[in-house]
Amino acid sequence: MKDLWTVKYRPKSLEDIVGNEQSVDMVEKLSRSNNLPHLVFHGPENTGKSSTAFALAREIYGDDYERNLAYFNASDFFEQGKNYLVRDKRFTRIIGTDDPKKIDKSVISIFKEIINEYAGMAPVDSDFKIIFIDNAESLNPDSQHALRRIMEKYTATCRFILSTSQPSKLINPLRSRGLQLFFTHVSDDKLAKFILGIVEAEAIRINNDGIDALIYHSKGNIARAVNTLQIASIQTGNEDIGAQQIYEATLREQSENIIKLFEAIISKDLLEARKFIDNLILEEGLSGREILLQLHKVATSSNEPEDTVAMWTTRIADTDFYLTESANERIQLESLAAVFCK
């Protein structure tokens, strides 16, 4: 089986990162200054926030960066809860069981304990270690206040990087603790140059129409472009990749559970719809917005009447807006399904 190109071509250093020059340049200067502050990376999904955090750690610590970098995904904690905690072997000693039903403590209290313990660990051959918390918007106010206190307590030996697509969800005292840097999707020119580099490295054939279709579909999202290109290359083999092959690859990107969710909604079966929402979030790890984007694509390409599709599109857009105001994606998605199932 081929390696995932999104992993294979993930930037290893800060200079490898495409786009967001202003933010990346600032991070590079800070890495050389020996005076790194806490950082808050904010911007849409798949804009290079995580890649920058890992590249920064490599810049500071070298190839053994993992000794001084701890990564936590807040959405795993607070969306998947105790089922996630028992799957991550790092937490076995703290929770003392591999059965989620036997965990007496709340997820919030376990989160506080884990972060406090990792922050308290001494750095290895360095003045400080880095704790990177991804999807920080999933932290509720109580856990954010606890995190602020931990940041203050260990500021001498620990630096925090918070990454979020919804900075307004972070409390002001937490945002003010770090330097805020914005990330966005890359321009079409930069994306095309990056994609052509992969095309050359993988010795695949793609015509100009294929490149244009890939750029149009990706809308500056490098991860989406790379994933679509790999699917298209597998489907076509040694043949040229054109616009049609890119279109067919985008259809393959849709999760089977999205189709089943849509069918459950059409059948007005709310219990089935909730099951597939859980599968998409817990098993496939999709975000609320990724689910909405795929659901929108299925709805607009269905054979349902135009007025029905227009109603679905409006409801999906409303839910997308509600996601910016709510930390619990599952509740908003189940609410959407409930509206459709009436």
Image (cartoon, grey):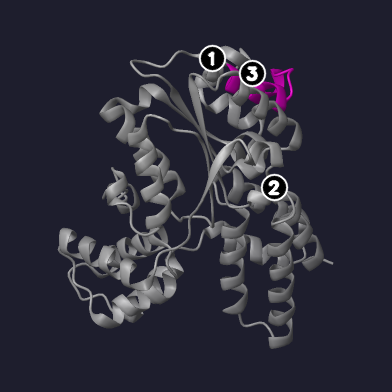
SS category of the residue bearing label 3: helix
Percent position of residue 274, x then y: 72, 52
**Which is more N-terminal, label 1 or label 2?**
1
Kind of residue at disc 2:
Lys
Stretch of the chain drawn in magenta: 99-116
Please indicate whether residue 4 sits to the left or right of residue 173 in the image.
left
Q: Does the magenta portion include 97?
A: no
Residue visible at 56% across and 72% down? 297
- Tag 3: Cα neighbours inside 10 Å, few (<14), some, or many (≥20)? some
Kind of residue at disc 3:
Glu
Residue visible at 58% across and 64% down? 259
State which mark lies toward you, 1 or 3. Answer: 1
Question: Which corner quadrant of the image does residue 87 belong to?
Answer: top right
Percent position of residue 4, x then y: 32, 50
**Which is more N-terminal, label 2 or label 3?**
3
Q: Nearer the viewer, residue 265 or 105?
A: 105
Where does the C terminus fall, quadrant-wise? bottom right
Residue corresponding to mark 2 = 169
